[in-house]
Image (tube, rainbow, N blue to C red):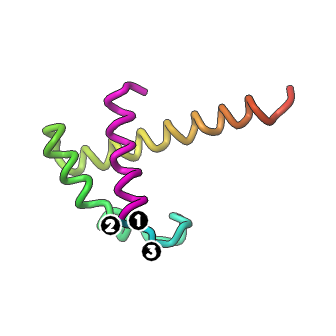
Amino acid sequence: MSAEDREFLDQIYKFIDENLKDMDSDPQKTPVSEQIQALRPILQELAMKYKMPVEDAFIKYMDLASEAAVERDRLFKEQFVEE
């Protein structure tokens, strides 16, 4: 993940931490439409900053979040799973 991608994702995570504390902590229990609506302000801000459609900002967020999750899983396995 590039530094720009990390900054993009970190801005969304910061927004979530500051503004969406009331949303169910389990994203599987919150409908996707509600999640998208809650993220809309930061996605619009990032879309303007990076000169892309809001839909592309959302897709980029989903891709980067998946990539970050895979990386966390890999690091966890390296640290705690014996081979």
Q: Which mark is residue 7?
A: none
Residue under numbered circle 3:
22
In terms of depth relative to the viewer, which is nearer, 29 or 1?
1
In the rendering, at what x and y percent does residue 70 appear? 58, 37
Q: Quadrant of the C terminus?
A: top right
The answer to the question of whether label 3 and label 2 lie on touching residues, with beta carbons closer than 8 A, is: no
Q: Which contiguous range is marked in magenta?
A: 1-18
In the rendering, at what x and y percent does residue 79 appear? 75, 32
* Label 1: which secondary element: helix
Q: Amino acid at mark 2?
A: Ala
Could you say which quadrant of the image residue 74 lies in?
Answer: top right
Residue under numbered circle 2:
38
Instruction: Nearest to the eye among marks 3 and 2: give it.
Output: 3
Q: CA distance from mark 3 to mark 2?
A: 11 Å
- 81 above or below 45? above
- Judged by its main secondary structure, the magenta piece is helix
Residue at coordinates 19% horizontally, 51% vertically from top-left?
Answer: 45
Residue at coordinates 56% horizontally, 66% vertically from top-left?
Answer: 26
Q: Earlier in the sequence, mark 3 or mark 2?
A: 3
- 44 above or below 26? above
Magenta-drawn stretch contains 2: yes
Q: Quadrant of the N terminus?
A: top left
Could you say which quadrant of the image residue 60 lies in?
Answer: top left
**Badge 3: how crowded within 10 Å, few (<14), some, or many (20+)?**
few
In the picture, measured across the screen, residue 70 lies left or right of residue 50, that is right
In the picture, measured across the screen, residue 26 lies left or right of residue 82, that is left
Residue at coordinates 31% horizontally, 30% vertically from top-left?
Answer: 4
Residue under numbered circle 1:
32
